[in-house]
Image: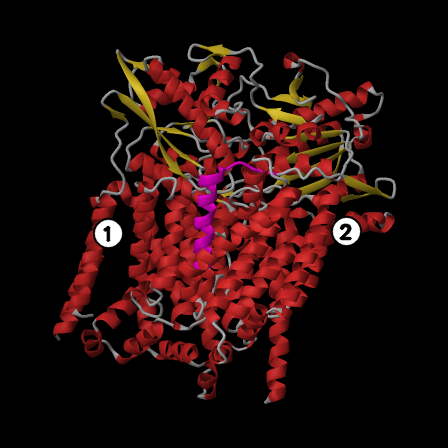
Amino acid sequence: MDNLLILFEAPIFSLQLLIDGLLIGAVFALAAYGMALVWGVMKIINFAQGEFVILGGFIVWTFFKLGINPFLGIPLAAAVLFIVGWVLYQIVIVRIVEEDLFISILATFGMAILLQQLMNQIFGADVQTVDPGLDTWFLFDGAVTVLQIKVVSFFIAIILGAILAVFLKKTRLGQAIRATAQDTRAARILGVDTNKVYATTFALNAAICGAAGALVVMTWVIQPFAGLAYTIRSFMIVIVAGIGNVAGVVFAGLGLGAAENFAGFLFGAEFQAAFVFSLLVVILLYRNYKLRLKRRYLK
Amino acid sequence: MKSMGQKSVFYGVIVILSLIVPWLLPAYQTQLAFLWVMVVFALTWDVVGGQMGYNSFGNIVFFGIGMYVTAVIQRNMHFDIEEYVHVAGRVETLTPVQYLEGLFLGMGAGVVVAVVIAAGLGACILAMGMRGQYFGICTLGLGVAAGELANGWEYIGAGSGLVTPVFPDQLGQRGAFFYYIFFILAVIAFLTLRYLYAGRFGLAINAIRDDEDKAEAMGIHTTRYKIIAWCISAFFLSLVGGGAGHLIGFIDPTEVAFAGATFGVWMILMAILGGKGTLWGPVIGAVIFHITQELFWTYLFGWQRVALGALIVAIVVFFPMGIMGWMRERWPERFGHRVEEREAFSASKGGG
Amino acid sequence: MTKKQSYLFTLIVIIAAISLVFAGPSWAKVEGDTIIFGAAVSFTGKYSTNGKHTKNGYDLVVKRVNEMGGVKVGDKTYKIDIKYYDDESTPARAGQLADRLIKQDEIKFILGPYGSGPTKGIAPITEKYKIPMVEGNGASRSLFNKGYRYIFAVLSTSEQYLAESINLLAEKFKEDGRDPKSAKVAIAVENDPFSMDIRAGVVDDAKRWGMKVVIDDKLPKELTDMTATLTKVKALRPDALIVSGHSKGAALAVRQTAQMKVDVPMLAITHCEAADVVGKFGGDANYTLCATQWAPTMTYKDEWFGFAGDYAEAFEKEYGYVPPYQAAESSAAVLVYVDALQRAGNFDTEKVRDAIAATNLQTFYGWVKFDETGKNIAKPMVLRQIQKGKYVPVAPRKFAAGEVIFPKPKWKDR
C-alpha cells in the first residue's frame, strides 16, 4: 500500500484529492439530482441521463464555435434540452410512466443508443472541448491546484440545485410536482394535471442535464458515446442517497466524487469502477437487510 | 390424438428444418449459430424474468463466466500461459482432439463454476429476500461489477482480453460445428424448460411471480425455487458462453463476455418481444429480433443504432405484452379453448 | 399447439429463412471491372473518432487509384471499391461482420478495422477462411504470436509506440550525468488491448534501463477524468508520464496536466494528431511528446501520391483536416493490396496472400516489408515533440529535425 503511505507522509495530497473529488462530485450530483427527481416523481429511471449531459455539452460547443461565451451557453443548453426533454416525454415517456420501473430502464436505454448515434451524425465523432478561458489557483506552493472552472462549476451546480429546491418548495408547479411524487392519485383527484407535472419534471431533468453537460465540456472532454459514465454515476448517487431522498443526492454526489477519487488513488484506476459497483451491491444488500429487520419487527 | 399428431408434425418440421438449414444456407452458418445463442439467451432469461417475475439485468454474468472458464481451461491445457498472453513467441495450432478436449472440458468446468456462483449469489441476494426494483438494480450492479473485475484481472488477460485458439481445419466447417452445438443446447434448454414449466416447478415460480408472500404462506419454499431457477438460467447460459467464446474467437471483458449493454439487454428484449412468461415467446422473439437486427446492420448502415434504439423503445413502449400476448388478446376464443390452464394464466400476466 | 399457431410459426421460420437469404446484396469479389475490398470499421462507439480517420484513409486511396486508371491485374485494369460495415467498436461485432463479408458478400480481400480489439475479433475469422487481411490499425503484438498466416499489418506494433520515449529519457539522463537507473516512470493507459501493449513495451524498456515504474494505472474504458492519477503524479514526481487512451485519453491528458499544472519533465502520449491536441489546446499542448507511425514531413514516396507531404495535401483538400497517422496507415494498407494484386496477376487468394507476404514496397507512408508473423519490420516509429504548436520529429536520430526539449519547462515559467 505504497499509495496509502504517500497520503500519510504528505497529507497535502489528501486535500488535493478531497477538493477535486468534491468539485467533480458537484457536477455528478447535478445530473443525479435530475435523475432523483424523475425517479421520485415519475418512478422512472432515466438511462439516457448521460446522453442528455453529452448533448448539453455539444450544444454549448456548437454555440462556442459560433462565438458565444460558454457561460452564456449554459442557459442555452438548458433551454434546448428542456425542449428535447418535453418532446421525448410526449413521444415516449408518457406511455411508460405508469409502467414497471424495469420497462422504463429498457425504454430509456433504447433512447440512449438512439441519441448516441444521432449525436454522432450531427456533431461528428470527434472528442470535443470548450475552453472557458479561466486559470488555476495554486495553494501550498503549488502542491494543491484548484481549477477556477471547477470552482465555478461547483457553485453553479449548487446554485442550480438551490434554485430547484426553492422552485419545488415555493411555486405552485413545484408544489404540484411534490404532491404528485407523494401520491399521484390523490394529486389527480385534487385537480393537479399530473400529465403536465410529469412533462415538466422530465423536461426539467433534461434541462438540468444540459447545464451539467455545459460544465462537463468546459472542464473535461466529451464524445458522442461517452454518456454511459454519467448515467452510471447518477444512478449510483441516487441509490446511495436512497430512492426518493432528493436532498441526500447532493451529499451522496459529493461523497461519491471524493470516495472515487481516493479509491482511484489507492487501488489504481482499473479497480475504481469495480469498487464502486461492488459498493452498490453491498449497499443494496445492507438496505435490504435493514428492511427485513423492520418487516420482522412489524410482524 | 389429433392434436398430438399435429404437434409432433410441427416439432418434426422445425427440427428437420433446423438440421438442414446450415447446408441450405452455407453462407449464413455463423449468423444462424448466433440465432440459437439468442434463443438460449431469451429462454434462460425468461425463467427468472418472465416465469418468476424477477427482472434480472445480471444474467449476462453467467454467460461471461462460462466463456472465460472455457477459454482459460483451453489455454492452460495446451499453452504456456506466459507465451500465450505476453511474449511474442509463436503458438502452435491445436489438433482437433486437443481443441475438442479443451472446449468440452472447459464448458463442463464453466457450468460447474457458473452454477456454484449462481447458487452463492442466489444465497446472498435472493435468500435475503431482495425483490422488485431492488433486485433489478442489484443485478445490474452485479453485471457491471463482473465486467470491471474481469477488466482488471491479469490472469485472464485483463483489458487485453483472451484469444481462443484457431478452429482446426480437420473439424470441418466452423460455422456448422458451432451451429449444431448451439442448436442442441437450445433444444435441450427448451425441452428442459417445457418439462419443468409443466410440473410443480413451473407452478411454484409462477406463484412466486404472482404473489410471493402468499406463495410462501401456502408452504412453497420460495427461496429454494428462486435459487434453482437462477441456477438453471446459469447452467445453460454458461454452456452457451463457453461455445460463443470459441466462436467469436476473441474475448473482451466488457464488450464480449460481460456485454451487458448488448447481449445483456437483448436477452430481455427478445423475451419481451416474443411474450414474457410463455414457453414459445422467447423463441419467437429471439428469431425475429436477431433477424431484424441483422437486417438493420445491412441496410441501415450509419443509422442502425438509431433504428435499434427506436426498435427497443417501440418494443417496450408499444408492445410490452409481446407477440404471444398479442395473439392471445387478438384471438382469445381460439386460444382460450386449446391452451392449457397454466399457459392461459401466465398469458394474462405476461403483459404486466 | 393449435393449427393457427403452428402455421404462424412455420410462416415465421420461412420468412426468417428467406430474409436471411436476401440479407445483404451479394457482392462478388470482382464485379465487372471492379475489385471490392471489405472492411468493418468503427463508425459508432468509443473508437468512432478514429474509425472516421480509417475510413477517410481507405477512401482517399480508392479515389486516387480510380482517378489514375485503376489497378492492373493480369492484363486487365480494374477499379477498386470498398464495402463497409459498422463494427460499433466491439470485437464481437467485428468478427461477425468479417464472417458476413467473406461468406455472404463473397469478398476475398479484407481491410482491417480500427483498433486492436476489433482486429483481434476479425483475425480468427480471416484465418479460418484463409482470406488475407491487410490492416493498418491493429497494433497489439498479441495479434502476431498466434501463428496467424493471413494477417498483415503495415504499422509498427504497439510496444514500439512509446518505448522510444524511455530511451530518450535514459539518453537525457546520461547527458545530465545522472544514472538512468534513478529515473522514475509513471504509466497511465486505457484498459484495452492496444494500450495495454503500449504499457508492456514501456515496462520492458524501463526494466532494461533499470528504471522504476512508480505509477501503473489502467484507466477505465469509460474514461472521463484523470484527476486521481494526476494527483499521484504530483505526489511521486516521476521523470516521465506515459499516457495512452486513444483520442479521448490524449485530449484528457493534455487538458488535465495543463489545468492541474502537473509538472513532469516528460509527457509522452499517443493519438496527439487524431485528437488534434494542438488545435484544441494551443500552447498547453507544447512540449508533449507524441508517438507517431508517420508524419507528413517524411521523405518517402510512391507512384500514387508522391511524397508524404503530397499525400497530406491531397487528404486535407478532400477532408479538410491534416491527416493523422491513423488515416495514413489505412491508406498504406490499401496500397499494399494494390501492389500485391498487380504482382500476383490474378485473384487467387493464396497467390495474393503470398504476394502480400513478399511485399517490399515504398509507399508515401514508409517502407513495407513483412516478417513471417505478418508485421511490418521495415518501418520505425517516430517520436515528435510539439514545439511552439508544431510537431517536430525528435527521435529516432535518423528522422530528428530538432532537439528534444527536456525537461519541459515548469508551468509557472510558461
Q: Residue furthest front?
A: A172
| Residue mark closest to the camera, 2 vs 1 | 2
Residue C146 in view of the camera: no
Which quarter of the figure has residue B228?
bottom left
- Of the pair B71 and A87, the residue shown nearer to us: A87
Closest to the observer: C243 or C317?
A: C317
Q: Is residue A296 magenta?
A: no
> What kind of residue is marked 2?
Ile
C257 horizontally vs A44: left or right: right
Dot 1 amino acid type = Ala
Residue denoted by label 1: C16
Q: Residue at x 28, y 22 (%)?
A: C34
Q: Position of residue C135 (x, y in %)?
A: 45, 28
Give the answer, above or below, for where B214 lies relative to A78: below
- Judge the density around disc 1: few (<14), some (14-19), many (≥20) Cα neighbours within 10 Å: some
Which chain does the residue under circle 2 lie in? A
Picture disc at residue A19: 2
Q: Secondary structure at mark 1?
A: helix
- Magenta residue span: A107-129
Q: Chain of mark 1?
A: C
In this rendering, position of residue A39 left or right of residue C385: left
Q: What whole-number distance in Å separates the C-alpha atoms at marks 2 and 1?
A: 58 Å
Q: Is residue C55 above or below residue A44?
A: above
- Extreme left residue here? B2
Nearest the camera: B76 or C49? Answer: C49
Q: Is residue C299 above or below residue C375?
A: above
